[in-house]
Amino acid sequence: MSQEKQVMEWIESHQDEIIQFLQQLIQIPSINPWFFDEPAPSKEKELQEFIASRLEGLGADIELWEPVADDLKQYEGMAGYYPGRDFTGRPNLAATFGKDTEGKSLLLFGHIDVVMAGSKWTVDPFEGKIIDGKMYGRGTVDMKGGVAAMIMAVEAILRSGFKLKGPVVVGTVVDEEAGGMGALDFIHHGYRADACILTEPTSLTIAPLCRGILWGKIKIQGRSGHIEMPQADWKNGGAVDAIKKARYILEQLDRLNEEWAINKTHPYLSIPCQVHVAQLNAGEYPTSFANEAEIVFNAQYLPSERDEKLVGGNVKKELTEFLRQAAESDPWLSEHMPEIEWMVDADCAETPVSHPFVQTCVQSLKGIGEEGKIEGLGFHTDMGWPVNVGIPTINFGPGDPSLAHHSDEFTPVAEVIQAVKMIAKTIVDWCEIEEA
């Protein structure tokens, strides 16, 4: 019997154990503390220690450490850097198998923090209940399903009686849900590999790129006045409705999006980059014209648009210039120029589809009976920093990413098993294995 077949048979016969491990991950609510108004104890450390214990039991060399924001000052202005962020009780974990072996190395990478459960769940969000072949729970999609799959893939190889010819590092980090400082710190810590699988949910497709995301607020000034009374011209002190001016900016954004729909596309992305308006905030009283208005937006950008710091500075300049030109065409706005307050710049990256590692992953996926489809991700993942330091990286994992952060988030159990198989086959083919 071939090595690969033995590993696949182990996975087939241990499906219950694989799914139970995912349930155990779900049952430790490792909510990123950024989502709490008041400081709250994080369960991230408890989960990392649980994972570390299991991996140590399989023979891994374990390193568990807390990021220190002051140690990362050299990355100011780059992805994932947030000055003063506190990681007390929020460790990163690296577990190395086959240390000092000479074959090709592989990093299996993922984040263990999740967003808050939120409301309107019909099941316990931290139970991992299985209904009709689907496991429900916060993090089943984003991204404990992928983390469980990558860990169990390594376990399947080792417990099938094999050892690795090349090192495999299992890296689990914190803080992806609040900006990605955990991933930055992991790379800063010195971990490298010849390739990386980031096990974000992709519905079992190979995703060798993700888009960058900018969050911003366009702040538009008006001048309040009694809404039921005649108003003088604004030049003579009359009221100016900030909501009406915001409508003008929104119309200009529609025109910009028509241009972006043509100019900001990628062959592996199903939708173009756009400036999506997420919130409108304006007004103080029902009897007054709005004194100011705020448009909160989400704008996406492509890896080809990154600036010298590998983030979205070029697109920030583009949107700032767009807003200036739009305002110049309006008499009031040209004298009361709107401003953009930038909130988040979540970076992006891309690995060429022709890279041997990408093709190895495609063949692994086909080898377990899947289509082997390649499709980019329209959202941000932690792949930026591995790619920035020269590690070819793909996103691959179980679960539909559109269900991330939803009430009743779920992942099909069968997809988790398929993900274990694909990752295990990639380890066999990329790192190579031999009898222990």
Image (tube, grey):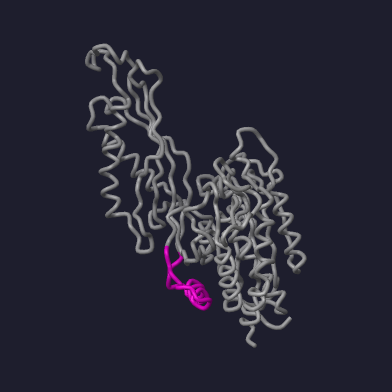
The part of the image, by quadrant, that contains residue 318 is: top left
State whether residue 234 is above or below residue 270.
above
- Tell me if 277 is positioned left or right of 195 in this view: left
Question: Which sits in the foreground, 155 or 337?
Answer: 155
User: Residue at (43%, 73%) from the top-left corner?
Assistant: 354
Where's residue 147, x and y in %? 62, 60
Q: Closest to the observer: 365 or 259?
A: 365
| Residue 45, visible in the rendered structure | yes
Q: Is residue 432 left or right of residue 54?
A: left
| Magenta residues (range) | 351-375
Magenta span contains residue 350: no
| Residue 149: image location, x then y, percent | 61, 65
Residue toward you, 375 or 18 = 18
Viewer-proximal residue among 381 and 86: 381
| Magenta span contains residue 354 | yes
Q: Quadrant location of residue 119?
A: top right
Residue pushed farthest top?
229
At x 51%, y 49%, the residue is 79
Residue 21: x %, y % from top left: 68, 61
Place residue 99 in its image quadrant.
bottom right
Q: Which quarter of the rendering shows the N terminus?
A: bottom right
**Residue drawn at 27 percent across, 54 percent down:** 262
Q: Is residue 137 above or below residue 356?
A: above
Q: Residue furthest bottom?
A: 1
Above/below status of 299 relative to 135: above
